[in-house]
Image: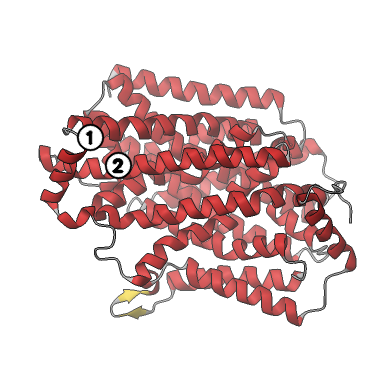
Amino acid sequence: MSVYTLVSLLGYFALMMGIGVYAYRNSTSDVSEYMLGGRQLHPAVGALSAGASDMSGWMLMGLPGAIYLSGFSAVWIAVGLVAGAYLNYLLVAPRLRVYTEVADDAITIPDFFEKRFDDRSHALRVISSVVIVIFFTLYTSSGVVAGGKLFESSFGLSYELGLFLTAGVVVAYTLFGGFLAVSLTDFVQGAIMFVALIMVPVVAIFQLGGIEATASEVRGVNPDLLTWFTGVSGLALISSLSWGLGYFGQPHIIVRFMAIRTLKDVATARHIGMSWMLVTVLGAVGTGIAGIAYVAGTKTVLEDPETVFILLSQVLFHPLVGGFLLAAILAAIMSTISSQLLVSSSSLTEDFYKTFVRRDASQKELVLIGRISVFAVSIIAILLAFDRSASILSLVSNAWAGFGAAFGPIILLSLFWKRLTRNGALAGMIVGAVTVLFWIYAPIEIDGRTLSEHLYEIVPGFVLSMGAATSVSLLDERPKRAIGRRHDSIDLTMAGRDAPAPGSA
């Protein structure tokens, strides 16, 4: 590692830790501030924070690697994600922002479910919390794996040391700074990713002689790499596009909507967030295509396709700039890990400790438990990440499907269908999660391929979850009148009339 690269990385680490210290001093006095920032998130911070925590190492490693291997036929995942993100901003963000505040100021997704349905049994809270902890531990480990690969391939450090360095910095600023630290660091990290995903493909294509010269080089490798449908079956297309369904159920993304300052700010966040996403997705695709041309033209050996961004950043730029670009990968990885750690922590604190262990716990005690939870989840994620053979994309896809199928239909129905009952929500959540796990791990093969290889598990999970929630609700007794009146009040608020007071029924 050159001195210049080291300077860039140390500067990045120092900035992240500085933000953590700032947040620790300004916004960790009670559990609501620690977990949700007091609902005072600026729309620009909320948008970039949601984008950065969403895309993670997948944007700079997973997607360019998939494009490098399969060409434009792998773009359909990105198309599905862009469409899903837009619908998430349009449908879920505004209503969730209002509903969670009206529902007795719910600060976590399990908390919202319990208060939305007035569930005195705590069953919704417990089941949703279990889903969060299981799938987020998996999800967090994917980010730690990406960090280990980065330090090994770029700096010559051991994979295991990379795991601890990546997780260590994230845990430090998340543990002390809470939601404010996570959101501010995500904002900075999102800005770094934005710049990096413009610089790398633009400079690479320029070095290769322009767009036409790059395309010509790729055609020389395989003309099919520049076609969108070659080798893409109907089921494969559905699987790729269905990634967009996952957005409706991702706790680390939709929690940002709950924290934005006002309903009006949600629209501003949508414009900023979608602009950021379009540019970065195009940059990631361009990186993968430029990587194919560069490797073919220079006869470079690239053992791991998921490191194509790293290769281009190191061979095309001065080490000082290269260090900045490596920091962009760390930014992508860390932004997601920190968000997932915080959501897992909030679930363990609010939905387990406060509900079942100490209902009268002080705010100071709850913040302490939140910090202990951050540390505990990170340790488990590191242990899982010791399996270095794990693909970043496969780990992310499993967790993404789990949340999308378990929570997505329930979030949508909770926000838009007054008739949904507690039992319906519970049935949908369980059916969605179990279907995804069955689809991934069942020892069933068709024509020598697993179920997941035929159809992405989010599709059957989402459909069966929606069906179970709807059918059980229609067979169930109607919700209490107070629940129905509160739901009606949300419709009035969205129409700009008679805004309800928080906690009103």
Horizontal arrangement in the rendering, residue 456 relative to residue 87 (left or right)? left
Q: Is residue 387 above or below residue 1?
A: below
Which label was assigned to residue 205?
A: 1
Kindly identify the residue that appears in the image at 37 percent across and 57 percent down: 76
**Callout 2: helix, strand or loop?**
helix
Proximity of marks 2 and 1: CB atoms separated by less than 8 Å: yes
Residue denoted by label 2? 286
* Mark 1 closeness class: few <14, some 14–19, many ≥20 residues within 10 Å: many
* Alpha carbon distance from label 2 to label 1: 8 Å
Q: Looking at the picture, tell me which residue is in the foreground, 463 or 389.
A: 463
Q: Earlier in the sequence, mark 2 or mark 1?
A: 1
Residue 252 pos. (x, y %): 59, 47
Horizontal arrangement in the rendering, residue 116 relative to residue 247 (left or right)? right
Amino acid at pointer 2: Gly
Q: How many numbered dots are placed on residues in this image?
A: 2
Horizontal arrangement in the rendering, residue 57 relative to residue 69 (left or right)? right
In the current view of this chain or complex, which residue is farthest to the bottom? 475
Q: Looking at the picture, tell me which residue is in the foreground, 180 or 144.
A: 180
**Callout 1: helix, strand or loop?**
helix
Question: In which quarter of the view is residue 258 placed?
Answer: top right
Q: Is residue 230 above or below residue 333?
A: below
Q: Is residue 460 above or below residue 223?
A: below
Horizontal arrangement in the rendering, residue 43 relative to residue 205 (left or right)? right
